[in-house]
Image (spheres, rainbow, N blue to C red):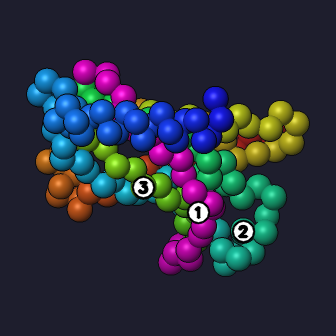
């Protein structure tokens, strides 16, 4: 299906939902949550981030991770993909991170699973993105955090 056809289909679906009341079905809600955060990895190094960012072993796989958010019942509520790799100097080293933003319907609880890009198969590489574990959080906890939810990937590597 082409992008243009998909856009027309999504627009028609949106119009139909509005015409039917737009409440998302029985017990649904029009309320949404704008959730933001990052997937990050802290590296304890004696070099500035700019030097680390030039290293071929930098944690590039933090960019492009698909996050799938679901309810406690297992219904998929939305997905996001982390953006480009960024970094900031820390007192003890360097934090590499990739941000995401997603609009989700209100739910009492949220679950997330991670789907990083497949790793290279020949050279040494950063493997922390592969080690991300599914997580859960309540709406109350998210509200207390200002609707931010970030995830730490360990600074682990595979060396063949």
Q: Where does the image place residue 31, in percent across and percent down from the top left?
A: 18, 47
- Mark 1 and mark 2 lie on one chain; the one further toward the N terminus is 2
Pointer 1: what residue?
A: 96
**Tag 2 residue:** 53
Asked whether residue 141 appears in the rendered view, the answer is yes
Nearer-the-camera pick, 13 or 53: 13
Visible in this render: residue 40? no
Q: In 3D space, how far apart are the residues under numbered discs 1 and 2 (Cα atoms)?
A: 9 Å
Q: Residue 54 appears at what percent x and percent y?
A: 78, 69
CB atoms of marks 1 and 2 within 8 Å: yes
Q: Earlier in the sequence, mark 2 or mark 3?
A: 2
Residue at 79 percent across and 64 percent down: it is: 55
- Is residue 50 located in the magenta-colored stretch of the structure? no
Which of pointers 2 and 3 indicates the residue nearer the eye? Answer: 3
Give the residue at x 11% y 28%.
27
Disc 3 crowd, CA 10 A, few/some/many (<14, 14-19, 20+): some
| Element under disc 3 | strand
Residue at horizontal 62 percent and vertical 47 percent from the top: 64
Q: Residue furthest left?
A: 27
Q: Quadrant of residue 6?
A: top right
Q: Is residue 77 magenta?
A: yes
Instruction: Indicate the quadrant where residue 57 lies.
Output: bottom right
The residue stretch that appears in magenta: 73-92
* Residue identifier under label 3: 101
Estimate the spatial distance between the alpha carbons at disc 2 and disc 3, rounded to whole Å: 24 Å
- Quadrant in which residue 66 is drawn: top right
Relative height, residue 83 to residue 157 (above, below): below
Q: Is residue 116 left or right of residue 125?
A: left
Indicate left or right for 27 with 86 as reference: left
Secondary structure of residue under mark 2: helix
- Badge 1 marks a residue whose secondary structure is strand
């Amino acid at each position: 299906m082409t992008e243009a056809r998909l856009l027309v289909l999504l627009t028609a679906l949106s119009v139909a939902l509005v015409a039917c009341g737009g409440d998302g079905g029985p017990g649904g809600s029009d309320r949404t949550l704008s959730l933001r955060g990052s997937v990050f990895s802290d590296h304890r190094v004696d070099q500035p981030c700019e030097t680390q960012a030039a290293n071929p072993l930098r944690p590039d796989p933090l960019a492009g991770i698909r996050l799938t958010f679901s309810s406690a019942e297992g219904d998929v509520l939305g997905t996001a993909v982390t953006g480009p790799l960024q970094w900031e100097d820390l007192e003890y080293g360097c934090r590499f991170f990739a941000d995401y933003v997603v609009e989700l319907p209100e739910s009492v609880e949220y679950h997330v699973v991670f789907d990083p890009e497949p790793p290279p198969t020949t050279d040494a590489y950063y493997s922390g993105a592969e080690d991300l574990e599914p997580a859960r959080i309540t709406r109350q906890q998210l509200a207390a955090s200002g609707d931010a939810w970030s995830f730490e990937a360990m600074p682990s590597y595979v060396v063949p």
